[in-house]
Image: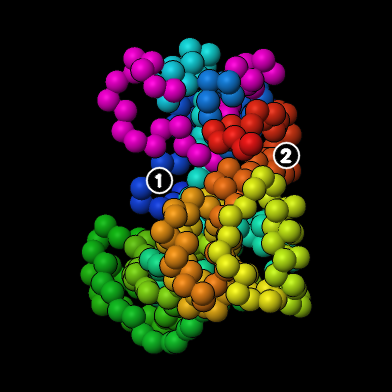
Amino acid sequence: MTTTVKQITNFLNEVFPFAYRESYDNVGLLVGNAEAEVKGLLITLDVTEAVIDEAISIGCNVILAHHPIIFQPIKHLTGASYVERTIMHAIRNDIAIIASHTNTDNSVLGTNHYLAKRFGLQGTKPLLPLTDTLRKLVTFVPVLFEQKVKEALFDAGAGVIGNYDKTSFTIQGTGSFRGNKNTHAFSGTPDKLHFEKEIRIETVFPKHLEKKIIKSLIEAHPYEEVAYDIFQIENTQNNFGSGIIGRLPENVDTDKFLHKIKATIGGGIRYTNKHKETIGTVAICGGTGIFLLQAAIRQKADIFITSDVKYHQFFDADGKIILVDVGHYESEQFTKEIFFSLIKNKFSTFAPHLSKINTNPINYL
């Protein structure tokens, strides 16, 4: 039994749906053959020439990275930049590169939630829930097939709202149809108008499951032609969104919590004035998260942990929140551990490895 690069990519798409990446992002299989057998997989935050060399040295032909090596359009491959050289080096050695970036950041299983657990946060939710992630399905089935069709939809992932599953609404009515002589209808006679007692089923589902939901509906439905409607809805769901906010079990002295941040993240931290004596509500966004500062303030966070904060952006905290910059690499370093655990528990035909190379381009004195 073997595992292909495509199977790895599909698994990541299930756990961290690519549909929930930010519009500017580039995720999925970026380099390599989707049908190639996975002999070994190296997990890293960034892909560099040194990481390619590391993969070669330990027999890995697949690299799973958080940051995509191809972020901007590439117009030529001449080796003029580290990006071009890295891609060329991977291609020469038949190494596939997969990226799972903002789709991971936006997931309930992503880095922000991992950090929230490290800090002991409770009652967590996204700072900014994603929009346009839900769809509503409406379909009509014969009375006797109601349960069969609903269970097929639920098994495919429909009907989940927060901590509840198998949610739906049903109402009974009468459907009508007339098939021509070429039909093989579930009931009725060709060329004659037929009336059937039917159940209208309504349920919601995440948009990335649409193909799976429709396939399950058609397979479970007894009709030759299945009638259904899919609507875009504005409701948000708390499984996907930017950043995270939650509460500590009890308020902690501000100095003590700042030291905990440094001990947990490592490196040096920058922060605004400590105008709060204690910390109770904590907001986090790994990577570049300053765009969430006002959301953190509106939700009354005492402190906001992120990275890549510019000098003048520190002023925007405006005495309303303690803004902490922990560094981009430092804030996302645990993504490797998340990937490693998921891959190791899912696949047994190859060995996953954590890269030993620190790809952080920033050094501290």
Provide residue 286's location: percent of width, then percent of height. 56, 54
Which residue is more in the foreground, 301 or 216? 301
**Residue at coordinates 70% horizontally, 47% vertically from top-left?**
266
Q: Which residues are magenta?
A: 53-82
Instruction: Label the magenta part by its dominant secondary structure.
Output: loop
Q: Earlier in the sequence, mark 2 or mark 1?
A: 1
Provide residue 215's location: percent of width, then percent of height. 45, 56
Tell me, yes or no, if residue 25 can be seen here. yes
- Check disc 2 and report the residue beneath it: 344
- Mark nearest the camera among 2 and 1 is 1
Establish if 355 lies above or below 14: above
Residues at discs 2 and 1 in contact (Cβ within 8 Å): no
Kindly identify the amino acid type of the residue bearing the numbered disc 1: Asp
Residue reaching furthest to the top: 92
- Secondary element at image label 1: loop
**Residue 30: which quarter of the image?**
top left
Establish if 264 lies above or below 201: above
Q: Specify the quadrant that holds the C terminus.
A: top right
- Check disc 1 and report the residue beneath it: 25
**Residue 112: which quarter of the image?**
bottom right
Q: In the figure, is residue 289 to the left or right of 192? A: right
Which residue is more in the foreground, 245 or 217? 245
**Residue at coordinates 41% horizontally, 41% vertically from top-left?**
26
Kindly identify the amino acid type of the residue bearing the numbered disc 2: Lys
Q: CA distance from mark 2 to mark 1?
A: 26 Å
